[in-house]
Image (cartoon, helix red, strand yellow):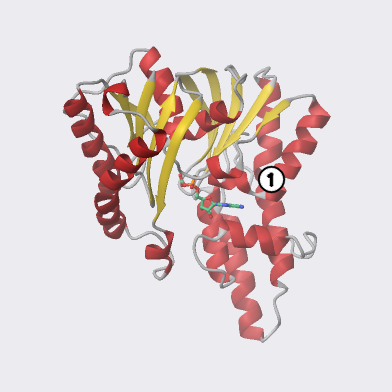
Amino acid sequence: MIILSVESSCDETAVALVEDGRKVLTDQIFSQVDLHAVYGGVVPEIASRSHTEVISILAQRAIAEAGITRDQIDAVAVTYAPGLIGALLVGVNFAKAAAMSLGVPLIPVHHIRGHIAANYLAFPDLEPPFLALAVSGGNSMIVDVRDYTDMKIIGATRDDAAGECFDKTARVLGLGYPGGRPIDELSKTGDDSKYKLPLAHVEDNPYDMSFSGLKTAVINLAHQAQQKGDALDAPSLAASFCKAVSDSLVPRTIAAAKALGKEKVVVAGGVAANSRIRRDFIAACEKEGLRLYFPPLKLCGDNGAMIGAQGYYEYMAGTRGTMDLNAYANMMI
Ligand code: KG4
């Protein structure tokens, strides 16, 4: 079964063709990063306009590069939540028009379910149940994945997402937008014990997280150094910051996996590309005897293939969208 899949929830426009939820025939991505970098973050109106400009071109290119004909497309899957509402609507309306004109089913897909499903593309043998940590620019959550379409959030950030915290910290360090990758690079030459940064504990749910205190601590450190005229050791601050985020994410995820009796841990989303977090997860899972899955770097960030992977399992479970399908800025998984 070949699914044409569409992703436009934030600042990447992506159209992919995926076979049986596991094989990527093509994954066309247009990143808007350069359009937003000058503003230091995503400007929603610019994002929507750019999606509109490139989405049909990407779809045409996907079909040409996969070497298929339109009548071989069996369904159209699309991210319909969560994300920037105007950006999501571009993808949803494009997908509706494509499904109608091709005469095939429309499949709405939750963006975070898609991030988790990126792992199905990389690991053909991976099947639920497992515990997933989804960490991206807009979300940070620990998810009990009981089956392909049966999931429950067991912990989430109470305030900022981990990726948002990376981006704000990078801005303070003058590293540009998006900041996750430059901080990751800079941290490699730093001393992670140089700066003591706060770790938040959420009282009533041990699996919930909080990153706003960490963000404020980094901003205060940078401003105080500036006011006193002290030199900031940027690589060590980056390394201490990566350690603090990893210390928030890794032990919580491992504890949740053990509490729920899971044998597999799956990490997903843009922040899953972080080398410190990857290293700490490898060590922790080895110690606890858990099997660990990370998507390759190119499948960590937003892409269309992950929506095609989850779309296949949604289709199998009977999920269908109608022509009045709407987009939603927020939605539980
Ligand atoms: O999954 P994604 O592409 O978009 C959303 O769905 O939000 O994630 C983007 C986020 C950004 O905040 C970016 O700074 C972060 O992922 N990111 C990283 C790394 N690469 C990207 N964060 C930490 N380390 C990285 N290597």
Where residue 231 sits in the image (x, y, percent)? Answer: 71, 81
- 310 lies above or below 330: above
- 9 lies above or below 237: above
Q: Nearer the viewer, residue 261 or 121?
A: 121
Q: Nearer the viewer, residue 245 or 69?
A: 69
Where residue 251 sits in the image (x, y, percent)? Answer: 71, 37
Circle 1 SS class? helix
Q: Residue furthest right?
A: 287
Is residue 136 found left or right of 81 in the rendered image?
Answer: right
- 201 lies above or below 306: below
Is residue 210 found left or right of 149 in the rendered image?
Answer: right
Residue 112 in view here: no
Where residue 326 sits in the image (x, y, percent)? Answer: 22, 33
| Disc 1 C-beta below 8 A from ligand 1 | yes
Disc 1: which residue: 277
Q: Nearer the viewer, residue 280 or 104?
A: 104
The residue lying at 50 percent from left, 43 percent from top is: 158
Q: Residues within 10 Å of mark 1 (few under 14, many from 20)?
A: many
Q: Residue furthest front?
A: 67
Q: Dividing the picture into quarters, in which one does residue 36 lie?
A: bottom left
The residue lying at 22 percent from left, 32 percent from top is: 98
Is residue 67 found left or right of 284 in the rendered image?
Answer: left
Residue type, mark 1 in image: Ile
Q: Dividing the picture into quarters, in which one does residue 184 lie?
A: bottom right
- For the C terminus, the quadrant is top left
Where residue 112 sits in the image (x, y, percent)? Answer: 46, 34
Residue 174 in view here: yes
